[in-house]
Structures are given as C-alpha cells and as structure tokens.
Amino acid sequence: VAVPFYNEEGNVRDVVKGLISEFNKNKISYELILVNNGSKDSTPRIIEKLKRGNRRIKQINIPKNQGYGWGVISGLNAARGNYISYIDGDNQVHPKFLVNAYNKIKDANAAICTTARVKRKESIARKIASIGYNSFVNMFFHTNVNDINSKPKIIKQKFYKELKLSSKDWFIDTEIMAKAKSRGMKVVEMPIRCKERLKGSSNVNFGVVFELLSDMV
C-alpha cells in the first residue's frame, strides 16, 4: 500500500495505525510505502519514527513536491506485492474498505479494483464539478466508472507494469482508468463511505478542475 503524505502531520499516525490494525485483524500480509511528498511540516520525521518500529514500513522522501501523481507513482514503483494499491493520507477512508477492495479484486480475478464514494462531506459546487468531470472522462475515454478520483485503488502488479504511468499531478487516476480501458483490462468497482476531514487541509481546489481538463485534452 502506497500512501502519499503532503503536510499531513496530524493524520500520519492514525492512517498507519488504522491500516496495520485492519491488516492484522484480517491476517493479510502487507507492506506500507509511506511517501513524504515534499512536506514542509513534521510529516517526514513522524514517518521515520513509525518506520523504526515496523519492518513492514518503507519510507520514501521526495524533497520537493512535484504533484500528487508523482507521490503515488514513487510509492507504487517501490511496492513488491502481487497486489499493489494506494490510498490518500488524509484519514477520510476507513482501512476496512481497502481490505474489502482487496477481497473483491481477488474474487473477481480482475486487473484493477477501484472505488466510488457514495457518502462524502464536501460542498455542492465540488460535487457538481466531480459529476461533470466523471461524465467527461467516461464520454471521451469510453470508461464506465462512477468516481474516477476515488481511492483506494488496487492493481495487480503484472498489470501495473503494463500501464507505464507518467502523470505527476491529479490526472493519475484518470490515466489509470483510461489505459486500463484501452488495454482491455478487467476493472471492478465497489462503493465506499468517506469521513469528514478532521485534521489538516485539502490541497484540491477549482484550479485542479482546469488542470484535469487540460490533461484530458
């Protein structure tokens, strides 16, 4: 599991603790790739402390933030499992949904398992922007996904290598879905619920919408 963190000092411990607890409870062998994605707060120091106490934790330091996608790719490239995944470091998704996605991709023998947020705390304007973007992506790339940017996503390692991802920004999720469609990969989707962000702040704004549209073109 790759987890990119950008100035998430208030969430790092809770995210890692939750993932470890859920994996141990379900007896799942795991590896956590904690990516300090150019943070300016104490995030890298917290990751360093967590790594010392658990050999299953690997730390990756990116000195200067180059975008969300680069944090994801850096983490996934370092992952060694047969199934690799990524989840946001904002602690808004309970780790049980990652376990559910893991079970679903195995049961369906799929290349990718993505998710769709059926309950999320955000403004009406952002919901409208999200619906519009998903519609554009499905129309232009002939995908059939309800929530392109939802995480976690799980990918079989052998299929990940075929994707050859390159998006350093927020377009990474769309690149995955578009390439999976063009290569005829089997994709399954499952619903998740999101919690309200209690610590830290989101780096997503309306400028991201125009960035995504530009990347799509």
Image (tube, rainbow, N blue to C red):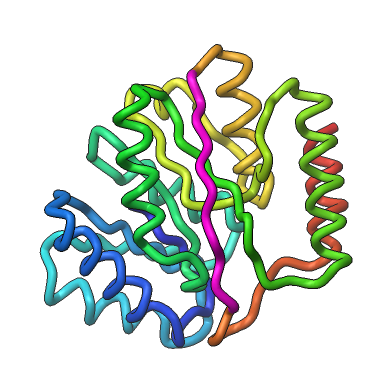
The residue positioned 65% from the left and 27% from the top of the image is: 178
For residue 1, side relative to residue 89 (left or right): left
The residue positioned 31% from the left and 57% from the top of the image is: 33
For residue 80, side relative to residue 206 (left or right): left
The majority secondary structure of the magenta stretch comes to strand
- The answer, for residue 165, to whether it is visible in the render is yes
**Closer to the camera in the image, 44 or 146:** 146
Residue 50: percent from the left, percent from the top? 22, 77
- The image quarter containing residue 66 is bottom right
Above or below, 168 relative to 162: below
- The image quarter containing residue 48 is bottom left
Residue 195 part of the magenta-drawn span: yes
Magenta residues, start to end: 186-196
Residue 169: percent from the left, percent from the top? 66, 51
Above or below, 92 relative to 163: below
The residue positioned 53% from the left and 82% from the top of the image is: 40
Residue 182: percent from the left, percent from the top? 62, 15
- The answer, for residue 70, to whether it is visible in the render is no
